[in-house]
Image: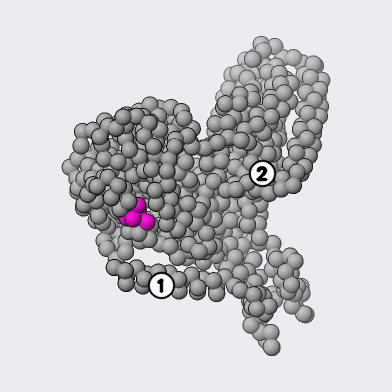
Amino acid sequence: MASDTNPGGDWAAAMQKAQADLLRQWTDMGQSWTRTATAGPGAAAPPPGGVPGSPGASAEGLARHFLQQCEQYLGISRSLWDLVTRSAAVGDAEQRNRAFTEGLGSLQQQFAGLWATTPFGAPGAAPFGGGMTGMAGFPGMQGLAGMPGMPGMPGMTGMTGMPGMAGLPGAFNMPSLGPTREQQESWQRLGQLGARCAQAQMQVSGQWNDIIGKALRELAERLAPRLKSGAVPGSLKEVYDLWVDSAESVYAQAARGAAFVQAQAELTNATSQLRSAQRELLEEWAKQFDLPTRAELNSVHQQLRELKAALAGIRG
Amino acid sequence: MAEAQVPSTPFDELGELPGRLAATVRSLQAAADVTFGCSEKDAVYREDKLTLYHYRAIAPSANLPPVLIVYALVNRPYMMDLQPDRSLIRRLLELGIDVYLIDWGYVDGADRYTDLNDYINGYLHRCLDVVLRAHQLPATTLLGVCQGGTFSLCYAALHPERVRNLITMVTPVDFQTSDNLLSRWAQSIDVDALVAAHGVVPGEVLNAVYVSLLPFRLLQQKYVNLLDADGDQAQMDNFMRMEKWIFDSPAQAGAAFREFMRWFYQENRLLKGTLEIGGRRVDLRNVRQAVLNVYGKQDHLVPPAASTALESLVGTTDYMALGLDVGHIGMYVSGRSQRELPQAIAYWLQRR
């Protein structure tokens, strides 16, 4: 419900009280919810068919996700609203417009940061293959930061597991020598792929930063004329929805662009190769302990498939 | 010009927010027990992970050939019978149509070499065997949904004598229309590397792709909009059912995924007439039976042009396109679809 008058001095106090109330309720709900989630045996286990960490996993997971999204919503909406109110206070229409547009520019980093910290991560991060940092909410998709806990697999950032190789610049490109030559090559490949993934991730992040910047400019274009005429939006939600509309509109264009497609594909492809390389190393380790490997199992599956086909042929 | 006036609404909004948040969270927690599926059915055939279901009649028979629903490999088929007021299957049953449905199940690591030939000339073929035997018919109606529609098209082209009528719903045929973002992304993906890395491609990967098509809406705004429900439990239950369905994505058999991505998305073979399944060419001109092609005018996953391309490719003269003003998911559950689609299908079937 819009008012015709500016509440003036009361507004800061009202805002502070509302925020304090909100924070208290929020904290209470969070604590209550945490107790519920950790209360019973199996409470942390995903339901059958559910996706742990995704909003579809359970009502509890959805509630958590919902609260996190509301926090983001509030952050975005309040930042925009603060800017709207600051700009609206400027008497001259042209200056008001300019103040708003310039203010939006300063929000770019904050918005990009908010988006990157969503529980799902930046959605542009290799959706086909699982991202490096972006898909932390998806099970099995956050495994790029080395293999902590695996014997002899301290990670891929550098060659810290190889004697004398730690911290050597250009170690990934050194020719492999000596009795551990084959292992060195595997680690070098892992390191190269890790570096390639990091590079690709940077390209994708750059694309996202551009999208956020353009989305803010789009928002300015949609809001500024209204501010200029003195008609500010009626609610936080209205400003937020306008932001989402602007962002989706810009994203729809950018996501079709060659640069975005290329960056995303490179991240996906590099990630795929890295995962395969990681598995090869794991399998080497498993062989040393005479444990079954994926490659062995695949071989058995192929044999079974051929046998089934042969049997079907005999049966006619 | 006057200074802009700042409305007081944000203060009201912030003041109301704690209460609305609490109500929404309570409703979400209460929505944990939502159930899926509302129509009684019997499993009449099982093979590997697959189950063929036959739905029990709830109305006098309309004396039409049974309809075999071929669902997509992605997502679960219970979307076709989600709840009493959102069930295409229930509406068809109410109209006296006999309904079967293929549930492909959840593939696992043992299915990595299952390919499109296995799905189309194997599983689908044998399910149709069961239906035709049960009704002592030489041919019946296939209703293919999304990717299942593409499979049904391939099947009808390869085995036209066993398909009396063909209904395709939100089915891609031209995989490279300019408005198909999914296709645009797929062109540069190294599918071999992706499948080699995963073996079976996790459903989470597909989920990530789908939400990436509209990230600001699907990752954030739709949750924020829950506040507008004001804790309405029925609305929250509906939301929860959809949420469960959207993220209940089976993994994809590696070989089939590779073939689908490469042959359909990257090479557009179905459209070009160069597709081969099981060593036989899929020529859509062999589709001479009656075809009803249903598409969503607002579909962002399968844009209208991707579906309507079918008309110029099939050999039949009895082709009808039906565009509903809904999106991809709205085709299954929207009120408009529930009102219009089952009636349209029944009407179309009765005249053939």
Drawn side of residue B287 relative to residue A186, left or right:
left
In the image, residue B298 sits, relative to residue A132, either above or below, namely above
Percent x, y of residue B252? 48, 56
Q: Disc 1 sits on a residue from what chain?
A: A
Query: Is residue B34 rendered magenta in the image?
Result: no
Write down the quadrant of residue B319 in the picture: top left
Mark number for residue A118? 2
Residue B195 appears in view:
no
Q: Circle 2 — which element?
A: loop
Q: Which residue type carries mark 1?
A: Glu
In space, the residues marked 2 and 1 are separated at their CA atoms by 46 Å
For disc 1, the marked residue is A306
Q: How many C-alpha atoms fall within 10 Å of the one at disc 1: few (<14), some, or many (≥20)?
A: few
Q: Disc 2 sits on a residue from what chain?
A: A
Q: Which badge, 2 or 1, comes first in the chain's sequence?
A: 2
Residues beneath discs 2 and 1 located on the same chain: yes
Percent x, y of residue A136? 66, 52
Percent x, y of residue A105? 66, 38
User: A150 or A222, which lies in front?
Assistant: A150
Q: Report the span colored magenta.
A: B123-127
Magenta stretch prevailing secondary structure: helix
User: A252 or B173, which lies in front?
Assistant: B173
Residue at image point 63% right, 69% down? A278
